[in-house]
Image (cartoon, rainbow, N blue to C red):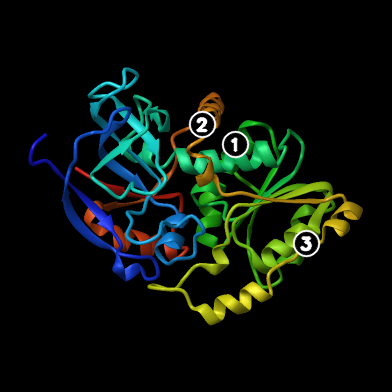
């Protein structure tokens, strides 16, 4: 459409959150094989913060638009499977902080009729991450005790719900009593507020039960203690490193260097003897794999999970404030940007 434009949040280069700027730009013609979506909600992820501060291995070089997931309405389509007016949710390898997104058709999913756009923007990335960590890497199974760190966050809460749906006993850890209360109200009884002596806390709550799986996106001593607590055949699955989260604007490189040097290190020969495993992944590298995306979508749909918990909604113009809410570690559930 001649004269059409969109709003975006763009940074000229990674390294400082304060560089993020809201801009208007013209919309080009929709490329063949693509679907154009009028975005109504954008989901925030810790990967956005790490990308904007230059701490993410997948960060684009030069200027880029952050954001991995969105929900909205199809406004134009060059493919038969998506029609104008369809309500959709989708994943994209950066570029979601925008009022209009062009995306490959396989990276979209139908938004359930009884879900809001905010629910759609909060579902795919965190649920795919939780499910891939639990099932594909963690070999989760009924009766195999699982420990989930940051259990009140977007991925953590979905992982807790998946475990409950599949009959998996689960322990969650959180950073404060407010999040513990929230999880208990959601029906999760075993929740630890991580303290100075986390290993002792973990031993107490395990009470002799063998621990088979840990999902961790924190790192450091919390991760080390969790690995040490694993029973034989246990697995530690790592999908993030929140301990390296930057300050309000940019990384503190000296602090990060110290943490990096003190990070847990794992010896493959020792793991053979202990019969434990460490696995790690970054799901963004999998978006372009059509078959895997379709498989993950079918599997998480089959779980029949309730709508994700959206804990914080900001206007699109408030992206910096929304990022600070997420970066602070005080959020519960998903942080979402809303567009009219």
Q: Give me the C-alpha separation between circle 1 and circle 2.
A: 8 Å
Report the number of discs: 3
Give the residue pinned by disc 1: 162
Task: Give whichever of discs 1 and 2 has the lower sequence position.
Answer: 1
Label ID, residue 191: none
Q: Nearer the viewer, mark 3 or mark 2?
A: 3
Label ID, residue 266: 3
Q: Position of residue 114 (x, y in %)?
A: 35, 27
Task: Give whichever of discs 3 and 2 has the lower sequence position.
Answer: 3
Asked if labels 2 and 3 touch by Cβ distance under 8 angstroms, the answer is: no
* Residue found at x 55% / y 43%: 129
Which of these two is toward me, 60 or 36?
Answer: 60
Q: Is residue 338 left or right of residue 125?
A: left
Which of these two is toward me, 304 or 182?
Answer: 304
User: Quarter-wise, where is residue 37 in the image?
Assistant: top left
Give the residue pinned by disc 2: 305
* Residue found at x 42% / y 45%: 93
């Amino acid at each position: 459409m001649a004269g059409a434009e969109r709003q975006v949040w763009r940074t000229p280069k990674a390294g400082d959150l304060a560089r993020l700027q809201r801009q208007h730009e013209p919309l080009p013609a929709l490329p063949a094989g693509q679907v154009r979506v009028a975005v109504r909600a954008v989901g925030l992820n810790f990967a956005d913060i790490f990308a904007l501060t230059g701490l993410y291995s997948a960060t684009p070089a030069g200027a880029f638009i952050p954001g991995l997931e969105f929900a909205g309405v199809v406004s134009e389509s060059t493919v038969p499977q998506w029609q104008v007016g369809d309500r959709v949710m989708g994943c994209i390898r950066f570029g979601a902080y925008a009022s209009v997104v062009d995306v490959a058709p396989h990276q979209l999913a139908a938004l359930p009729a009884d879900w809001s756009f905010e629910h759609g923007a909060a579902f795919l990335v965190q649920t795919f991450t939780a499910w891939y960590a639990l099932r594909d890497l963690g070999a989760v199974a009924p009766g195999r005790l699982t420990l989930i760190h940051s259990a009140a966050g977007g991925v953590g809460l979905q992982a807790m719900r998946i475990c409950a749906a599949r009959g998996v006993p689960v322990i969650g850890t959180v950073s404060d009593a407010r999040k513990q209360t929230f999880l208990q109200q959601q029906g999760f009884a075993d929740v630890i507020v991580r303290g100075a002596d986390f290993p002792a806390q973990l031993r107490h709550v395990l009470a002799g039960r063998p621990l088979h799986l840990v999902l961790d996106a924190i790192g450091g001593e919390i991760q080390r203690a969790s690995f040490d607590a694993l029973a034989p055949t246990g697995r530690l699955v790592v999908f993030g490193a929140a301990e390296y989260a930057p300050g309000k604007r940019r990384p503190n490189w000296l602090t990060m260097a110290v943490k990096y040097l003190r990070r847990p290190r794992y010896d493959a020969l020792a793991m053979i003897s202990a019969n434990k495993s460490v696995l790690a992944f970054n799901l963004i590298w999998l978006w372009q794999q059509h078959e895997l995306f379709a498989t993950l979508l079918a599997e998480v749909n089959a779980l029949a999970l309730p709508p994700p918990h959206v804990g914080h909604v900001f206007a699109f113009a408030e992206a910096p404030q929304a990022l600070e809410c997420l970066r602070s570690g005080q959020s519960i559930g998903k942080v979402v940007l809303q567009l009219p």
